[in-house]
Amino acid sequence: MLKLENYITGKWITGDGDGQLLYNAVTGEAVAAASTKGLDFKSIIEYGRTVGNPALRKMTFHQRGNMLKALALHLRNHLEKFYTISYQTGATKADSWVDIEGGIGNLFANASLRRKFPDETFCIDGESHNLSKNNTFMGTHILVPKEGVALHINAFNFPVWGMLEKIAVNLLAGVPAIVKPATVTSYLTEAVVKEIIASGILPVGSLQLICGSTGDLLDHVTSQDVITFTGSASTGLMLKKTPAILDNNVPFNMEADSLNCIVLGEDVTPDKPEWDIFIKEIRKEMTLKAGQRCTGIRRIFVPENKMEDIWKAISTSLSQTTIGNPLNSAVRMGSLAGQKQRTEVKEQVQKLLAASQIVYGSLDSVEVIDADPKKGAFISPVLLMNALPWASVTGYTTNPSHEVEAFGPVSTIMPYKNMDDAIALSKLGKGSLVSTIVTADYKEARQYVVGAATHHGRILVLNDECARESTGHGSPLPLLVHGGPGRAGGGEEMGGLRGVKHYLQRTALQGSPTTITAITNVYQPNAKGKEPGKHPFKKYFEELQIGDQIITDKRVITSEDIDRFADLSGDHFYAHIKTTDFTGTMFEQQVAHGYFIMSVAAGLFVDSYEKNPVLLNYGIDELRFTKPVYPGAEVYIRFTCKEKLPNDKRVIEKPEDFKRGDDIDKGIVKWLVEFLDETNEITGVATILTMVAKKLQ
């Protein structure tokens, strides 16, 4: 019998004893055993803190991001191996694609986020603030990686995606991970981790794996650690009450299974495309992964006058789903993850039957292809109908349809009277990960979104406009938060930059602008500039220093200048015409176009007489015009190197994809441009970006 290994303290180690047997969900045969007995959990977490954490903290965001990209590319080379193992979990090719390639996609998505961060080990968070009259004292916020580990306790339904979507975020943040997958499908997680470790891409100690019980691991967490949990709400709440977590205020991000719902808009009729979209979405969500998704549709709300037509249409659609061995190309729904999961689903459906009746499917029989329905963990899709969703049922706060989840291909259809009723019913789930409304009526969509958002972490508005490209009800995306209030756990996963910040400590930083510039390596307004020695545009990327600054010559703005710019640009706004009667306006007289002043600024600070390392203007950020410039004003520019960012070479897979400049090593430089007049007051400010060449090696 294969015994799974735990990757801890830099070594692959098997636990003591026989361990827990793990089974092929399709055939019922034992495939492996898992044990963590005898492991020193305190040393595991200390190893992550003392070995993995320092190694990651020394890397910049860009280095960590490129590390994730390299890891994603490596794992793509081993897809066939992962798919072969994934079939044993009962997953079809489509199920496995979401789990495996969806997980790898998370690595790519988070790798791309490096461009949103500086090429530093930490970053500034948000705007800086001047805190003094004479501009000598200021404040800002910085984010630094925590000094602990990220402990991920994952669910059985996504043994690959569940791991990769989480570690992608903490690794980009600079924090190592200990991954504890659900034991029942941990053999697939182990296979992926073996490839990750074998690649040598991650620093030593960045990733550890526990296949089995967590033992007393949670007793050793500190305030620098972060825990994420995915699974049942009851288990999550039990873990959250661990004394060490409470005593040390350890961040605990919980994503719990929830009673997600889909709503059919009142405007949708059988002749509209949204009708078929609604049916298709329900079938997909009930059968993908055999309904074993934390985002699965558990409650279906339909206008009461459309109930019969809808449940019959859903039933017809479900009847076309072939169930069986996922290795058979004709199969569209595989098995549950194991016999235990099938037993639990049936038990939960029995509870739901206290207020509902089965209108499609069976708990006792299922037709399968190329498999034994008894040995494998197969179950029929089950559609329930609850005609009285507001009725109280003894033993429940309200109604089991809003309190009980069967974690499989099970959904309950219920009627609603009007949109306010649908919103109120959606909230009876006491907090959900996701809700979908299918409607072509924008007002109805707005009413539902604004009314239901307090109780949902994500809302999908689905209609014919987006259905072809929509990722669907059940697909969390790396750049959006995945979580929900109340029963759903109250946490947030992923979420782009938001997700990374879960693993960073935010600290307010106060001091002089020059001091904070030196600390952050980002130029702060009112800091002392540096004499560049030569025009900054004559410096290569590596030669430029933060704070390199020039003060330009002055230029007098004339009325004729303003007239010529108006003619050239076609902008004859009344404020730029000298014959305008300015009574009752914001201006005293003819005023210069803001974009004219921006153009004048470029003429003053650009060194344009010979070819230099500046390749092109990349854009303008945060352009503001703060004081009118009238004819006769003398303007000049304070031009300062604000920040430097790497610019990775584009990956060129085919010679024909080559574009001019792809062979040039370069970076992006941000410049603070301050427009001043003869009174030395700032009349405008902007951040311009240039692409600057690096020295030839």
Image (spheres, rainbow, N blue to C red):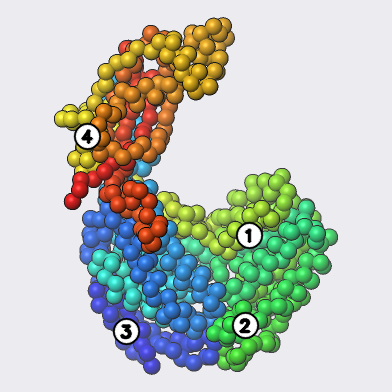
Specify few, some or many for label 2: CA neighbours under 10 Å numbering under 14, 14-19, or 20 or more: some
Relative to 320, say whether 238 is above or below.
Answer: above
Q: Position of residue 300 (x, y in %)?
A: 70, 64
Identify the residue at horizontal 66%, vertical 73% (top origin).
410
Where disc 3 sits, the SS reads: loop
- Res. 219 visible in picture: no
Measure how far apart labels 1 and 3 are at the Cα level: 48 Å
> In the image, what residue type sits under mark 3?
Gly
Q: Which residue corresponds to mark 2?
A: 330
Measure how far apart labels 1 and 2 are at the Cα level: 24 Å
User: Along the horizontal axis of the image, is 225 left or right of 481?
Assistant: left
Q: Which residue corresponds to mark 4?
A: 538
Task: State which tag comes first along the sequence, 1 or 4.
Answer: 1
Measure how far apart labels 4 and 3 are at the Cα level: 62 Å
Question: Which of the 4 quarters of the picture holds residue 228?
Answer: bottom left
Q: Which residue corresponds to mark 1?
A: 468
Identify the residue at horizontal 56%, vertical 70% (top origin).
293
Question: Which of the 4 quarters of the picture holds residue 36?
Answer: bottom left
Task: State which tag comes first along the sequence, 2 or 4.
Answer: 2
Which one is closest to the eye, mark 3 or mark 2?
2
Name, please, the residue furthest toward the right: 305
